[in-house]
Image: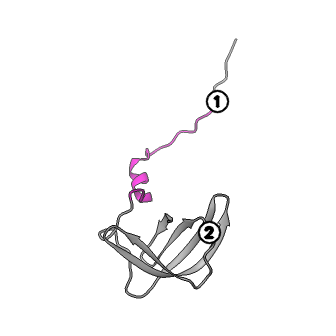
Amino acid sequence: MANLEDISLSGACIQVDAQIPNGAVVQISYPKGEFAGVVRYCMFKEIGYFVGVQFEAGYKWSRTSFKPMHLLDPRSLMKRAPHKMKPNLPTRQTS
């Protein structure tokens, strides 16, 4: 079992509980299919191992084939941001 942290056309980053060696072949399954790839890095951070997987030839991610529920397009944040942002300065109270 793994948590998907990030995904791109050519690979993904997953979070797992156990270390996976570089060069290991892994499969990432989702309801309508799977991706096969090779581990390129595995590093421990506070809450688990973060594993970089490079997809093998013939496996490419696209939003139409698989869209994670937590996928965030940073461009959508720009559309919602106000044009001019005012700094939130503390107010000074007078007696």
**Residue 43: x and y, percent?**
65, 70
Please give left or right for residue 39 compared with residue 56 in the image: right
The image shows residue 18 at horizontal and vertical percentages of 62, 69
Q: Is residue 57 above or below residue 70?
A: below
- Residue at position x 62%, y 33% from top? 89
**Residue flagged by tag 2: what amino acid is it?**
Ala
Q: Which quadrant would residue 15 be assigned to in this image?
A: bottom right
Foreground residue among 1 and 45: 1
Name the residue type under label 1.
Pro
Please rate how many residues cluster around mark 1, counting C-alpha atoms within 10 Å: few if below 14, some from 14 to 19, many from 20: few
Q: Which residue is mark 2?
A: 18
Q: Are marks 2 and 1 in contact (CB under 8 Å)?
A: no
Describe residue 54's horizontal placement relative to residue 30 as left or right: right
Residue drawn 58% across and 85% down? Answer: 23
What is the chief secondary structure element of the magenta stretch? loop
Tag 1 residue:
90
- Where residue 66 appears, x then y in whole percent? 34, 68
Stretch of the chain drawn in magenta: 69-90
Which marked residue is nearer to the observer: mark 2 or mark 1? 2
**Residue 20 on image: x %, y %:** 60, 76
Q: Secondary structure at mark 1?
A: loop
Is residue 87 rendered magenta in the image?
A: yes
